[in-house]
Structure formats: structure tokens, C-alpha cells
Image (cartoon, rainbow, N blue to C red):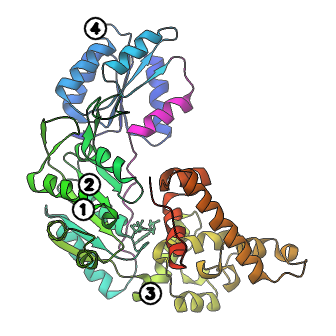
């Protein structure tokens, strides 16, 4: 069975091609069908994450197709396209269980936005086996072996050490690689929503459940589910998760129908989960179920031999043709080696991205390396526009402090207006959720109280 992101069902061949091209340009793997019968045949032979179907079609119209999909592929989301002026049809589409609808004609961006909500593009697994560190090389061999089994793996390690990279690599090398890789960040979603997101829900199960939704467990069927930042899950939900893992079946909220699961479970955390158990914050039984095979990702400072090879790889990833370590001057190499890298590989990547902006020639000099510990927009701005910032006699460190505190205030204010949601806060601030998490972690370390999710 081949995996696709979207199945487009549209009888107008030109429109079908245009819709497919639009989504393919966005990185989706697209399958196309020209009527409902062809769509059902293709769904029988392939795996897709979302169906986008026209309503008005000969042979089998969109509504009939929707009913057939519900019966044959429960949980598969369907987005219907209705013609302009047929609002009652759009309303009927939602009543019959379509996850959403688009009224023709629509802009490409409207299609992309709706599709993005239901069909997450899998990032290709990065080659994570970079660097000569002997401990890491041993770990990579272990990862390869455990990947080929069905066991649950618990990945522990500081933030930015590459736990998600390893989780993807495990999936890619596992018997589940033909299925989807689904990651859920348990810290980024408010507790009351996390349950619905994991287990799914039926229409009317709670206020706001206007249509049935499959949960992440169902979406990961025959593939891998990564429960990231698992230590942040609340105790009540931990009990429900344990039941699902033990029974290997899930019931959507508001339904008693059991859905059998064939999903490889991986969990990750940057806390010491055993300690959370001792503190009564994490269920011991769930801990043992998750840590069938525990793996600890070492901090970057514990594997200094990997710093430069990884830096070179990250420069390449960001479009710079770095052939070897000669791209760095001697002092830069020494500084990178001596630094403690509290943000690990993620911080190394940030430092390399900044260096690419700051470097003047072909090589990266020591002054192009701006580390997180004395960073942020302030020092960067100081480096880029040089003395323009300091001509009012304020010294750089106090300016730096001011900008850092302005940034922290912005983060706090946005978190408050977004009811603690990390996801929407990151969107509002125009930074990635990971960058936000990193900044929040630093704020927490320096004693700033962070609002919790509502
Ligand atoms: N071995 C590696 N090779 C290349 N890039 C890596 C490697 N390890 C990590 N990275 C990069 O570092 C960044 C952080 O990695 P990742 O998200 O996997 O860390 P993490 O441990 O899951 O972090 P967190 O606990 O904050 O979720 C990513 O951009 C990733 O691509």
C-alpha cells in the first residue's frame, strides 16, 4: 500500500490537475480520481490522510462518496468542494460529516490552509548518524536494531538533542515505515483538548464537537505515534492512555465502538521520567509500559567530537556549501569546542544560521558565532549594524538585557492572551513552536513564571 497525503476527486480534468499541482508544490503527495467509484477503488489500494472531493459529479456524487468513505474507511477526513450559490449543500456536507468545505471558486491559499489542518506533511527523516563520537556510533547501531522490532521506545534527553530526529529514523527503519508518522506534542496542547486530540470524538460528544473527528491514534494506524513531552501529560489522562496502550484499542469520546490499533508507540521527554514517578507526577505503571526500551540522547557537550561535523552538516542544510572544517577559523573552532551548548543541536543550528548572516567572507570567524547565552536580537542587531546601537553611550550588556526583557514580556503577554497555548503563541509571534519552547525553557530556568495552558 502506498502512502499519499491527499486524494483529489474532481471530474473536471483541468481543475483536477490544477488542484493536484497546487498541493504538490506545497510538498504533498497527491493522488487523483475523476469520480467517486474511481476514488473508492484508489482508496482500497492506497493509504491517504485526507480526501478533497467535488460534490457535483456523475457516476457517484460527493455525498454518496462521503457516506461510502465513512462506512469503508472510518476516520478518514473528507473535505467537500461545493459550487458557488449552493450554501445549503455546504451545510449538508457538514451535517453528513465532512470535516470542512470549500465554496468554488476559491483561492489556492484557501485550499492550502484547509488541507494543512488535516494532512500533515511528513518531513523526510534526516541522516542523524553524523559525527565520529564512539558512544553515539554505538547508540546509532542500537537504534537500528530496536527500530526493527515492535517495542515501545522511551527517548530521554535534554531539549534539542535530537529525540524527534531519532523517533523519525526509528519509524523509517521499522516494520511500520509504510504507514504514517504522527507526532503529538503533549506540552503544546491544553489538557482538555489533548484527550480529544489523541482519542478522537464523535459529533455532539461535547460542546463544540460539531463533527466527528479521528484521534491521533487512529491517524497513526499501521504507523508510528510519537508522544512528545510525555512528562507534561496530566495524571488523569495518563490513566486513559495506559488503558489504550494495554488494550491496543481506542474508543472515541462519545462512542463505545472499539477501534483496534496497530500502532508503534514512541515517547519522548526532556525530563528524567523516573524522577517524575518518584515525585508522584507520572504513573509508575505507565512509565514501565513506555520504557520497554529506554534510550538516552546525550547532550552535545558530552560528545564534543560531533560538534564540528554536525555544524558542517547544518551549514549545508541551510544552503552553504561547507566542504570541511576549514570553513571555520581556528578561534571559531576553539570557541565552538569550549562552549557548553545548553540548547544542544538545536542551538548549534541557530548559531550556524546566524553565522551565515553575519560572516563577511567565505569563512566563519569567531565574531560570527553568537551563542544563546549572550544572545538574542540585541547582540545580533549590534553585530549587524555595528555601532549604530551603542552611540548613545548605553553599554551593550544593559541594552542586551533590555531587549531580552522586552522579548520575554512579549512572549508572556502573548501567552496570556492565547490562554497559555504554545501553538497559537508561536504563530502570533512568527516563530516556530520549538523556538518558543526553547525560549520558555530558558525563561523558566531564570525563574520566570510561565502561564499554563487553559
Ligand atoms: N543528529 C542530527 N543531525 C542533524 N540534525 C540534528 C540532529 N539531531 C538534532 N538535529 C536538529 O536539531 C534540532 C532539534 O532536534 P529535535 O527536535 O529532534 O530535538 P528534541 O530532542 O526532540 O528537542 P525537544 O525536546 O525540544 O523537542 C532539529 O532542527 C534537528 O533537525
Name the secondary structure under disc 4.
loop
Inter-mark Cα distance, 4 to 2: 37 Å
Marked residue nearer the N-terminal end (4 or 1): 4
Q: Residue 24, image x and y in percent?
A: 45, 37
Indicate the quadrant where residue 219 lies.
top left
The residue at which mark 2 appears reads as: 225
Residue located farthest toward the left when viewing the structure as drawn:
247
Report crowding for label 2: few under 14, some 14 to 19, many 20 or more residues within 10 A (C-alpha): many
Position of 43 compared to 364: left or right? left
Name the secondary structure under disc 2.
strand
116 magenta-colored: yes
The residue at which mark 4 appears reads as: 59
Q: Residue 365, image x and y in percent?
A: 68, 83
Ligand 1 quadrant?
A: bottom left
Say whether mark 3 is within 8 Å of ligand 1: no
Inter-mark Cα distance, 2 to 1: 6 Å
Q: Residue 123, image x and y in percent?
A: 40, 53
Q: Nearer the viewer, mark 4 or mark 2?
A: 2
Amino acid at each position: 500500500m502506498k502512502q499519499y497525503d491527499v486524494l483529489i476527486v474532481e471530474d473536471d480534468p483541468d481543475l483536477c490537475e490544477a488542484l493536484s499541482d497546487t498541493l504538490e508544490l506545497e510538498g504533498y503527495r497527491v493522488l487523483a480520481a475523476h469520480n467517486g467509484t474511481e476514488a473508492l477503488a484508489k482508496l482500497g489500494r492506497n493509504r491517504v490522510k485526507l480526501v478533497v472531493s467535488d460534490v457535483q459529479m456523475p457516476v457517484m456524487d460527493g455525498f454518496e462518496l462521503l457516506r461510502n468513505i465513512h462506512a469503508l474507511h472510518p476516520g478518514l477526513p473528507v473535505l467537500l468542494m461545493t459550487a458557488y450559490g449552493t450554501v445549503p449543500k455546504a451545510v449538508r456536507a457538514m451535517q453528513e460529516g465532512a470535516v470542512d468545505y470549500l465554496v468554488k471558486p476559491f483561492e489556492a491559499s484557501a485550499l492550502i490552509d484547509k488541507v494543512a489542518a488535516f494532512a500533515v506533511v511528513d518531513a523526510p527523516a534526516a541522516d542523524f548518524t553524523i559525527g565520529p563520537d564512539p558512544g553515539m556510533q554505538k547508540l546509532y547501531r542500537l537504534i537500528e536494531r530496536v527500530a526493527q522490532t515492535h517495542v515501545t521506545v522511551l527517548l530521554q534527553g535534554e531539549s534539542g538533542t535530537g529525540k524527534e530526529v531519532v523517533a523519525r529514523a526509528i519509524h523509517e527503519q521499522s516494520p511500520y515505515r509504510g504507514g504514517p508518522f504522527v507526532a503529538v506534542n503533549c506540552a503544546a496542547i491544553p489538557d482538555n483538548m489533548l484527550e480529544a486530540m489523541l482519542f478522537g470524538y464523535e459529533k455532539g460528544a461535547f460542546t463544540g464537537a460539531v463533527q466527528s473527528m479521528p484521534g491521533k491514534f487512529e491517524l497513526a494506524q499501521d504507523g508510528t505515534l510519537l508522544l512528545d513531552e510525555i512528562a507534561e501529560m496530566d495524571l488523569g489522562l495518563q490513566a486513559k492512555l495506559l488503558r489504550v496502550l494495554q488494550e491496543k484499542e481506542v474508543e472515541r469520546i462519545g462512542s463505545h465502538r472499539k477501534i483496534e490499533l496497530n500502532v508503534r508507540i514512541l515517547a519522548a521527554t526532556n525530563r528524567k521520567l523516573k524522577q517524575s514517578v518518584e515525585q508522584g507526577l507520572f504513573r509508575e505503571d505507565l512509565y514501565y509500559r513506555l520504557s520497554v526500551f529506554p534510550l538516552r540522547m546525550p547532550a552535545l557537550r558530552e560528545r564534543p567530537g560531533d560538534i564540528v561535523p554536525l555544524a558542517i552538516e547544518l551549514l549545508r542544510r541551510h544552503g552553504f556549501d561547507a566542504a570541511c572544517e576549514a570553513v571555520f577559523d581556528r578561534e571559531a573552532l576553539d570557541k565552538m569546542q569550549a562552549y557548553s551548548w545548553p540548547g544542544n543541536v538545536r542551538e548549534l543550528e541557530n548559531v550556524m544560521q546566524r553565522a551565515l548572516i553575519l560572516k563577511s567572507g567565505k569563512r566563519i570567524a569567531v565574531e560570527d558565532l553568537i551563542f544563546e547565552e549572550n544572545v538574542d536580537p540585541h547582540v545580533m542587531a549590534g553585530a549587524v549594524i555595528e555601532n549604530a546601537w551603542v552611540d548613545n553611550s548605553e553599554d551593550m550588556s544593559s541594552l542586551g538585557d533590555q531587549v531580552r526583557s522586552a522579548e520575554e514580556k512579549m512572549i508572556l503577554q502573548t501567552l496570556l492572551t492565547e490562554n497559555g497555548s504554545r501553538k497559537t503563541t508561536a504563530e502570533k509571534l512568527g516563530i516556530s513552536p520549538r523556538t518558543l519552547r526553547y525560549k520558555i525553557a530558558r525563561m523558566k530556568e531564570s525563574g520566570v513564571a510561565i502561564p499554563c495552558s487553559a
